[in-house]
Structures are given as C-alpha cells and as structure tokens.
Amino acid sequence: MPVAFVVWRTVRLGASLPDTLAEVPAPLWRTVQLAVLVSATTAVVGTGLAWLTTRTDLPFRRAWRVALVLPLALPSFVGAAAFVAGLAPGGVIHDALTAVGITPPRRFRGLGASWLVMSAFTYPYVLLPVTARLANLRASLEESGRLLGFSAFQTFVRVTLPQLRSAIFGGALLVFLYSVSEFGAVQLLGYDTLTRVIYATRQTDRALSFASATVVLVLALGVVVLERSQRGRTSPDDRAAVASPDNVRLGWRVVPAITAVLAVLAVGLIVPLASLGTWARRGLADGRVAWGDLLDPAVSTATVAVIAAFVAVVVVFPVAAAAIRRPHPSTQVASVSVVVGFAIPGIVIALSLAVLTLNTPVLNRFYQTSALLVLAYVIHFGSQALAGTETAVRAVPESLRESSRLLEPRAARRLWRVDWPLMRPGLLAAGGLVMLSTLKELPITLLLSPIGFDTLATEIWGSYEEGFYAATGLASIALVALSATLTWVLVLRRSEVVSS
Amino acid sequence: MASTPTTASTIGARPTGRAAQRHRHDPTSTPAGAAVRIDGVNVTYASSSRSATVEAVRNATLHVEAGTIMALLGPSGCGKTSLLRAIAGLERPTAGSITIGDRTVSDTTTWVHPEQRSVGMVFQDGALFPHLSVADNVAFGLRSASSKLSKRDRAARVAEMLELVDLADYGDRLPGTLSGGQQQRIALARSLAPQPSVLLLDEPFSALDAALRLQVRADVADIVRSVGVTTVFVTHDQDEAFVLGDRVAVLRAGHIEQVGTPDELYRHPHTRWVAGFVGEANLVRGRWRPDGTVETLLGRVPVGTGAVRADRDARPEPSVRDDGRNDGRNGDDITDEASRDGSPVDVLVRPEQVDLRPGDCALVTNVEYYGHDVRYELELDDGSILAARTKSGDLHQRGDRLCVRFEGSPTEAWSADGDTVEGASTLLTP
C-alpha cells in the first residue's frame, strides 16, 4: 500500500517532472557508490573473519566469535555520532591522536566517513550467515579437495568459497539494502544520499521528496529481486558436517590475523563505545545529564517496542499459518508482501504514511498518534516476525494437531496444552526481533511520533543536533545496553555460531 | 583376482562388468597398488573437556599387501574411521608410523600432507562438489599441481573414468541430480582418476538403501579389482566386510582384535567377542575330554586348534597379529594336556553346526523362515537357549520337541569363566 501511494503521488505531483528528475541523479549516484563500496567491503571483511574464527587455530576463537557480532547492537547512526563526537575537540579519538602527535582530521564527513561507519556496523550481516555455512559445511568436501592434490588454501578457493557464495551474496545484498535505505548515519555524516534528500525536502519540495522515494524503492526492490533470483540458481547443499576439519595452522600469520580482528573490533565497537562513554561520564560528572533524564524516553521506547512486537506477531501469524498449512498463490502473495515491507526504506514508509494521513479527511486525526507509529513499525518490521512465526507454525505439524484432536475434544484446552507450549519459542523469537529493530529505529520515529514522545533514538538524534554530546553519549550507552541484552538473549544465545 | 561377473539375479543388471573387462585388458592405465604398512599407530582426539583426550586408535599394527582389499570392520566408535583417516593424512597419529609403498608418510618426525600422499578416498556421503558438473568433479584431481596433464589427456581420462563406472553420458549433469548410487560411483571415479596408489573407502554404501547397496557394492568391488589398486575400506557391516575384503581386520574399542581372511575369522575367531561380531554364535559350556574334544549337551565337539584360548576380552592384548591364527605366539593357549582334562570350556557352535534330529531334549520356541534356510530358537532342558539354522527341508513348528547334535568341522573353545552356570549355553548375537 505505501508502495502504491508513493508511486501514485510521484506521478500526480509530476508537473515539474523534468526539473525534479534533474536533481535525482547526483544523490542516486552517491547512494549507489556508498552501497556498492559498503557491500563489497563487508563481503570481504565478513568472509575473512568468518574463516579466521572457524577454520584456523586463532587463539580465543570463541571469544572473537561473540565479540565480532556485537557491532550489530550499535545502530549505525549511533556509531556515526560516536565517531563525530570522538573526533571533536575533547573527544576520545581527538585526544588520543593529539597525544601521539597526529593532527586530528578537521572534519569527518562524506563518502569516506560514511563508508567506514556503515561497513564497521554492518559486516556482521555477512559474518553471521558465512560462519553458519562454514560450521555446517560437510568436512568431507574440503578433505576431498586436499586428497585430490590441493593445498589448504587452494582448497578454500576452489571448494569452500563456491559453497559460501550464496551466504556471502545474501549477506552482502542485505548490507546493500541497508546502505540504500540508511538515513541516520549519512545524515549525521553529511553525505547526500537519496534518503537525506527525502528527509530534507519532505516539506519544501514534496515532488522531489517523492521522486527520490520512488527511486529508493525501485533500487531496494531491485536488490531484493536480484537476491531472490540468485538464491534460486544455486543448488543448496544442506547436508550437515560429520566432523570438523583440521584447522589451518596460522603460525606467524597469527599476528596479522589478530591485528585484523582487533582493528575491526576497534572501529566497530571499542572506539565508539569509548567515545560515547567518555562524553557520558563527563556529562554525569559535571551534572549536566543524569540517568533520570532517560527514564521517560527509555520507558516510551520499551513500551512502543513491546506493543509493536506484539501487534506484528498477531498480524503476521495468520499469514504464516496460511502460507504453511494451506499453500496457495494468494497466501504466497500475502507472505511475500510482508517481506517486501522490510525492503521499503523506513523513511519511505514514514513519508507515505504521514502524507497519506495528513491529506485524507478521516485519517488525518491519526497523524502523529502512537497507533500510526506502531502501524509503520509493523509494516516495516513485520517480515522479521515472519521467520519466527513460521517456525512456530511448523512446530505443530498436522499429524500432531490431528492426534491431539482425537485425544482432547476441547479446542481451547488443546490450544493451551499443545499448541502454545510448542509455538512459544518461535513466537517469542519473532516478537523479540521486531522489538530489537524498533528500539533502534530512527526515521519512522522521527517523522511519525506524537509531539513530546521521545524514544532513546530520537533523544540521541536531538541532542546530537544540538551538539550536546554528553546527552548523546548517555542515551547511546543506554540504547546499546538495551539492544545488546536483547541481541544476546534472542539472537546469539540460540545461534549455533556461538555455541559450536 | 577374478571379478565376479554381474549375475542375472542382481537388480537391474548393468554392463559394469563389461566396462571393467575392457579396462582390465588395458594394463597400461592400471596403477600399481602400493602396500600399506601401519606400525603401532595411536590416534587421539581432544575431547570436549579441554584437558582430556580420547584415544580412538591404540597401538594398531596392520599390513595391507599391494593390490589387495582390506576391510576394517567394527561397531561404531571402534576407531576404524580414525585409522582410515590416519592413512589419508586427515588425522595425525600421536605414535607409530605409516608407510605407503616404500615411502614413510607419517611417523614421529615425518608428516606428508594429504595432498601429497597419492591416496584416493570415497566418503560416506560421496562428497561430490555440488557446484561442479560430474565431469569437472572427476577432472578435479587432474588439475592439481602434481598432475600435469594436457587439456586433451584430461578429457580423455575423464571419459575413461566415466566409462569405467558406467556413467559415460552423465558428464554434464550436476551431482545433485544423480541418485545416491550414481553419486558414489562418480566419487569413486573422481578418486581413481589421478591414479592413486591407495584407495580408501569410508562406509561408502551406508547411505544407500538396502536394494541399491548390494548393487553398488558389487559394482565398486568389480571396478576396484579390475583397476588393481590397494584398497582399505571401513564398514560396520559384517556381510560387506566378508564379501568385499580379501582380508578383514576386526576392531573393537580402538584396538585391532584380529586380522584374517573372512573364513578364518568366521571359523576360528580369537575371542568370544569376534565370534559374536562376525556372525551368530552359540557358546556352549562343556568339559575337556582326554582326546582333545569337548563333551557338551550337543555331544562331542572337535576343537580344531587343539588348544583353548583364554578369552582375551578381559585383558586385550596390545600386539596385533595379522598372520593367521595360533602361531605359537599366543601365550593364552593352554597346551598342557593334564590341565585340559575335565576342566570347563565354552565351545563356539555356529547355528548351522547344530543338527536337529527327532527326539525329546529341546523345545522349539521360535521359527524364522527365510526361504533359503530356517532359523530356530530352541530351549534346552537346562533352560538355556540355542540358535540353529537348517536348510528349509522338513519344517518344524513352534512347540515341537527335538534333539540337537553338533555336526561340523572343528571349532574354537575358550576356557570358561567361573560365573557361568555349568552346562549353560550362551547366545551371542552380533
């Protein structure tokens, strides 16, 4: 629905189409540049780190495996803010560089800065699937490569890499999508991508705003289609490993390997946290900020996230159930449309919902209400609940439902005793993922939240805009702590990447 | 080294035999197999708890003659796969040495990487590279640094190998589109293409369903024998080991219990455990007679070795013999005539060595009809159970009463341990 609306508005506002279109190519080119650079970087970094932590005798592998996923808990706009604040006079990076006698760069903006920040916080999207694939890959394939006369490295290139292709592709395309629709980080780093144009011109030049939104949409959906077609072409090899193959002995190469891991962690985790932590500590010390200030935003963040998670699961569940129990073209369409919601950049959803409600007589009372906000979250993040709810539905197979029906005639009791216990883990995971995403969400919240309604994300944003780095730091720490806890509980604890 | 021609009774008989025949007439392409010598090899794994290690193979010594097929037989977890992987170079032994041909590939100071060992291996799952076509899979080992083949020779070799496994038309297919049996044949072709001096097979048929398994097993045996490559294969299936292996090494808990031809193992097992593992075994309690036979409930049983073995189950002996049975090194043999007289022993009686006659000393408690033969379970008057197999001539019913006698060639006996009840027979099933 938002898709149709955006396209329709673009066409309707098309009076000055040539003028508008003239302004699109430059930001489009910048967007594509950033997305290509970031996805290529993350593909290399993510694959390399996955290999190092699963296939070599790197010391402390298990610890690295956990630590290297943590940058995922930092929203990229928080990371961007951390770098800018750290490079400002008084920031950690500024002080550290000055201490060793290097003049800190005056400005941290543009393509280079955006590339670094985006790559540092999105490489886990490649690392996670590649690590999982490597852990599942049959050892016999690599062993066959060795026995047929190839060295460990040659075997990696000729045998292992082709098996990882779809995992790398899937992860990198996710990063591409993420980069295309990224709003917060590029906004903070002053890099003019399409999303920044959408935001900047949403009130002054609505035609341009909508035209940009359409272009972003086309780009995002194109990527999704590309990913789907790639997935169809590769024949998946899901057979699990019997034994883990002999690890590659790094020898002296352990030094560059550890250095690389530490460098990635420094950019993606240590430096941003140190920077934010320093500002927060300073602010707390001189009493300009206090944890108490964060109570309201924290409570509203948690509340809206829980509501969004609950609604998303309730909305998505029938779709998942129908798609699995009664496969039919119409149910397939329903489940695909849920997935498409994730591909639409958040700012496009926000923009279309805002304009739609403002300009429609009956709906305008919903503008800037929590209901509309939750609706936008559900449209955007519903797909994240899909996988979990599908797992939940599959947990109760038809045969089990039939046999429980024979044993227990009361439907409500059946639901409570059989279906709910089996479905609970899947549903909780689904809701948890939506919650996690909602916590970190910025553009939708910025555009649609009720007046006076602050989440941690908008708090970070607002204080950063005012240059009040102490408040930015404190709110960021709170947000990171919250999302790190959730990431740990929902994603890491149950993933084989860490336990294996 | 005659190969069994594909018989009409095999399901969907295919001309593998023919292809193999053709290959046999072309001795130039037949690589000379190399002997494999394993001396005192230990293989250990780091266990899940960090400090402890698990000893998968203990002091294994085994000699595989060039061009023969050796089966490593044992229950799961006995270390047979670890031993195979040590030959391949996929596990590094912690002690002992491994020699292939006249080259030592592994000892305390030497370590030859798997890619330099000239060893071919077929895995349980085939391990075909899913991203490569069948032809590219077979050609894979021909592209390595050690094999400098021109593009044309390579194509010729691939065609030859596909012909050998009788899948000449499948070169362009992807492995995922082949059946399990076809995948295993391609895996065999791939591992034979670079002309390895040793071929290793790791339970290559266990992933196949029963009907297919017999067929693929016959095909693979045919091909391997026609090529003449030294072969070591791992199986937990006694039939498979006996049908394919020229010689069989029986492993138990990381230790080689006995090595011998299938016939030696079946008729003259060294231990009770081997007796039970390589076939169904009745252990019948009896007493020595002065003439070297044993008096049992089944009558007098001749014991072929003329000696009793103390059961080595209780105290496994580290040294391993692969040179037949009863060579005088067996210190467990009781050769003293006097100690033999009257002392209790357990005698191995195979079910087919039990002759059923009219009489009234045993009750038929169970009948299993297999067509070619019938298996009976009988309860003797002392309450012990005995298994018997006879041709399906005159059939007995459950509840019939019969008499049982020993009928057959000399067998094996072990001195009885004290806790077994006098006169009882033990039924061991593999």
Image (cartoon, rainbow, N blue to C red):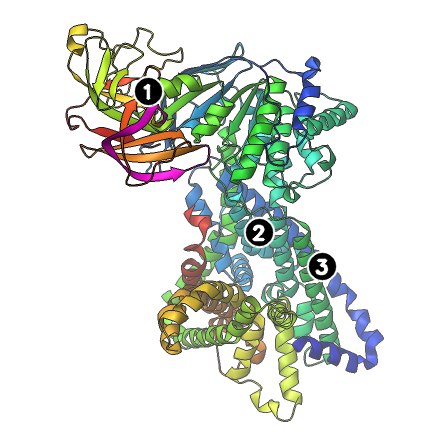
Q: In the image, what residue type sits under mark 3?
A: Val
Q: Which residue is mark 2?
A: A126
Which residue occupies 58% across, 33% down? B215
Q: Which residue is mark 1?
A: B407
Q: In the rendered image, which quarter is residue A178 located in?
A: bottom right
Question: Magenta region, mostly helix, strand or loop?
Answer: strand
Secondary structure, mark 3, is helix
Q: Nearer the viewer, residue B150 or B215?
A: B215
Q: Which residue is mark 3?
A: A32
User: For the C terminus of chain B, which image quadrant?
Assistant: top left
Foreground: disc 2 or disc 1? 1
Give the vertical position of B73 relative to A491 (above or below).
above
Query: Would you say residue B364 sits in the magenta stretch?
Result: yes
Which residue occupies 56% across, 34% down? A142
Foreground: disc 3 or disc 1? 1
Q: Nearer the viewer, residue A250 or B187?
A: B187
Mark 1, residues whose alpha carbon is within 10 Å: few (<14), some, or many (≥20)? some
In this view of the protein, can residue B402 be seen by the observer? Answer: yes
